[in-house]
Image (spheres, coloured by chain):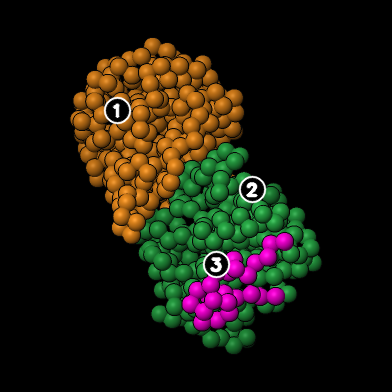
Amino acid sequence: MQHDNGRCISVDIGKKCAAQLIIFLFSQFDCLDKLFQHKNQIMRYFESKVVSNEQITGDIFVLRVLRNQAEARPGQFYMLKSWDTELTLMRPISIFKAEPEEMWFMYRVVGAGTQRFSELQPGLPIKLLGPCGNGYPYEDLKGKVAVLGGGVGIPPLCETAKTLKNQGVSVDAFLGFKDELFAVEDFKPWCENVYISTETGIEGHKGFVTDLLKPGQYDAVLTCGPEVMMRKVAAMCKEAGTTCYCSLEHRMACGIGACLGCSIRTKNGMKRVCKDGPVFNAEDLLW
Amino acid sequence: MENVNLSVKVAGVSFKNPIIAASGTFGFGDEYNELYNVGCLGGISSKGLTLHGKDGNEGIRVWETASGMMNSVGLQNPGVEHFIQEGIAQMRRFGNVLIANMGGHSMDDYITGASMLSNADIDMLELNISCPNVKSGGMAFGIKAEVAREVVKEVRKVCAKPLMVKLSPNAENIVDMALACEEAGADALSLVNTFQAMAIDIHKRKPVFNNVYAGLSGAAIKPIALRMVHSVCKNVKVPVVGMGGIYTAEDVLEFIMAGAQAVQIGTVNFNNPLAGRIILDDLVRLCVKEGIADINEIRGVCL
């Protein structure tokens, strides 16, 4: 998920320096929230620090920040901001990778907020609210699963593939791009196969990523990307009788289910994309 | 830290401090309560209720603007009955003032809803005559003083609880509107709701919102909201709760100096989820700094 209602920074640090940097940055860690003692409390609003912000290609960046110890599920997102009130709203960005000490986000610069993220440098403060949303129901999945992503819908599927692989599920990745590739290498450690498509044909299959998918070969298909692509995936899965989970995106204000700014109609009534989603079983959607 | 008295009263209802979470921005308190103890706030105004529940508007419902945002949620709510059965107990856990906000499509809806809520365990009824997002009802009531007068008069007959009428800044004349509501029996007034506004998606060449117009809120409206609060406070005798673009403790003091008994904070919660608690803590510090021992002593100093 990525929504933005708004230089190439590459940090090259040796392993020893990285460890020192992390220890230093961690000591600056500042929690603005109250301490909850009970286990099921997992959402926080906290100030963290940028570890690095790297341009991958074109308008795609990877932001790494120090994480807190709240558990995060693949398919969840954080509301981020690197400003005070200059922009009114925080931006919902999906988890790309949840590492032991860091949370990684891969985002595209599409507006004022992501433009500001792209200018972040190591050591600068950043505020996070989350983890938000339900994430993919990975615990329920077995056998062989396909993760299928289009464009900036691809990053959340990376942590998803890793989690599934660690659970003993066999994962195939189907990654669709317009032209330039990104994140492909990040999928390889967790996937049996990685299939690529580009609309321009510069790499992999020329056309749409859905051209490559045979849903009948999988116990489930997890998808994220442009709605038109996900609708196609859902239709193909329905025909094959394969379970399909879609991660939606929506304009959001609060990000935590309070304002009802992101509600959508489903077969089971009105649902909040930020709280009841962003992951929905395709069967629930009115597609 | 020195003791500052922040307790205030609105229409006979005591609040431990003047910070109230604004309707529509805070649900029924549960979501923000996961981040901090929302019971620390003086009060919470519930999501706007209607007699029968509503699903709300289709399409985009929120949109960022310079120093603010627009919304066209469309009063998605579970209905008055559901709120009475479940929402009240939910909100009572916080231990602060429980304000039920209610709007309506028709006079009958207003009367029925208000009498149901009047018999329920709420501390105040905030009457929404000003929601600009609903196609039928709501907006019409809050534009003309004479129409508003009728609604308040009828609701007053069935409402035994303190009745606070929430005014729309889109009213033809905010002072006339305030006076009409006061004359019709309002125990208090809260203002302002959102300003009717518009955004266009130039790539799609269409309005952003299905309903074309939507409500503007946030810092951009503060100076106008403040002027309206001041103007109303100069002309009415009933207590006034001020709102519109309040983001900081300084903003809170401005509204109180303009005559407000208490304030509501809305949009700022999206910018900073801990805003309620932070503004409250900052308010104490600010009062100490400004030599204010009791928040009530500076009320209306600018009137």
Look at label 2 and name its amino acid: Glu
Secondary structure under tag 2 reads helix
**Marked residue chain, label 3:** A
Percent across and percent down for residue A69 are 65, 62
From the image, tell me which residue sits under label 2: A283
Q: Are dots 3 and 2 in contact, CB under 8 Å? A: no
Residue A104 in picture, x, y percent from top left: 57, 70
Q: Is residue A96 visible?
A: no
Q: What residue do we see at 46% from left, 51% from top?
A: A252
Asked whether the beta carbons under mark 2 and mark 1 sit within 8 Å of each other, the answer is no
Q: Is residue A50 above or below residue A239?
A: below
Please tell me the colour of chain A: green
Query: In the image, what residue type sits under mark 1?
Result: Ala
- Please name whichever residue, B215 or B153, is drawn nearer the observer in this view of the structure: B215
Whether A245 is among the magenta residues is no
Classify mark 3: helix, strand or loop. strand
Query: Residue at coordinates 66% horizontally, 70% vertically from top-left?
Result: A173
Q: Nearer the viewer, residue A76 or B12?
A: A76
Residue A154 image position (x, y, % from top left):
57, 68
Q: Which residue is mark 1?
A: B140
Name the residue tied to disc 3. Answer: A150
**Tint of chain B:** orange
Q: Is residue A85 left or right of residue B277?
A: left
Q: Which residues are magenta?
A: A193-216
State whether residue A80 is above or below residue A18: above
